[in-house]
Amino acid sequence: KLILKSNKLTNITFSLPMESLIELDLSDNSFYLIQSSMFNNLFMLQKLSLINNNINYINFDAFNSNLIHLTGIFLGKNLLRYLEPFTFSSMKNLNTINLNENLIEKFDYAPFEGLTKLFTISINSNKINY
């Protein structure tokens, strides 16, 4: 487990071998963008928390095929308005996605396409109108 909570991080790359890391907490930082290479070399990661940052965009391939063991991703309290189609689709073991307290205006299934183990999508307190 690696906890880097409540710092002023805006970017991070894992170039050091961290293949055995199972949980990563980057909550309460200053990330605004999730880039493609941020989570390379985290092959065994199961839980990723990015709660309470300033994330307004997730690159379409940010969660690449390296995160095959990820079961939970927590993106609450950010500034997300929209998720690209297939954003999470490479994470085949994902069962929990938390998107609470963002600025999402429309719910679309496309970002979750192919996630057969997905059990919970939490999108409370967004701007969804139908």
Image: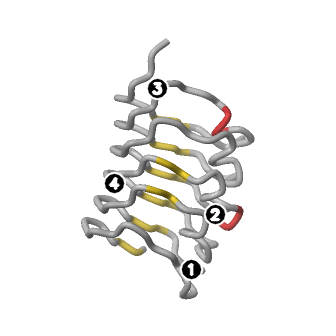
Residue neighbourhood size for the residue with mark 3, other residues' Cα within 10 Å, grouped as few (<14), some (14–19), many (≥20) = some
| Neighbourhood count class around disc 1 (C-alpha, 10 Å): few under 14, some 14–19, many 20 upward | few
Give, as a three-letter code, the residue at label 4.
Asn
- State the separation of the CA atoms marked 1 and 2: 12 Å
**Do residues under tags 1 and 2 come within 8 Å of each other at their CB atoms?**
no
Give residue 102's quadrant in the image. top left
Q: Earlier in the sequence, mark 2 or mark 4?
A: 4
Numbered mark located on residue 105 in the image: 3
Could you tell me how far apart the alpha carbons at marks 4 and 3 are, in whole angstroms?
A: 19 Å
Front-lying residue, 9 or 125? 9
Q: Are marks 4 and 1 in contact (CB under 8 Å)?
A: no
For image coordinates 66% across by 56% down, the residue present is 61
Q: Give the quarter of the image for residue 127.
A: top left
User: Closest to the observer: 53 or 21?
Assistant: 53
Residue type for callout 3: Glu
Residue on which the image places disc 2: 67
Relative side of 48 to 44, left or right: left
**113 w.r.t. 53: above or below:** above
Check disc 2 and report its element: helix, strand or loop: helix
Q: Nearer the viewer, mark 1 or mark 2?
A: 2
Left or right of residue 10: residue 84: right
From the image, tell me which residue sits under label 4. 53
The numbered mark, 3 or 2, whose residue comes first in the sequence reads: 2
Q: Which residue is rendered at x = 49% and y = 48% of the image?
A: 57
The residue wearing badge 1 is 20
- Label 2 or label 4, whichever lies nearer to me, is 4
Q: Nearer the viewer, mark 4 or mark 1?
A: 4
Residue type at tag 1:
Ser
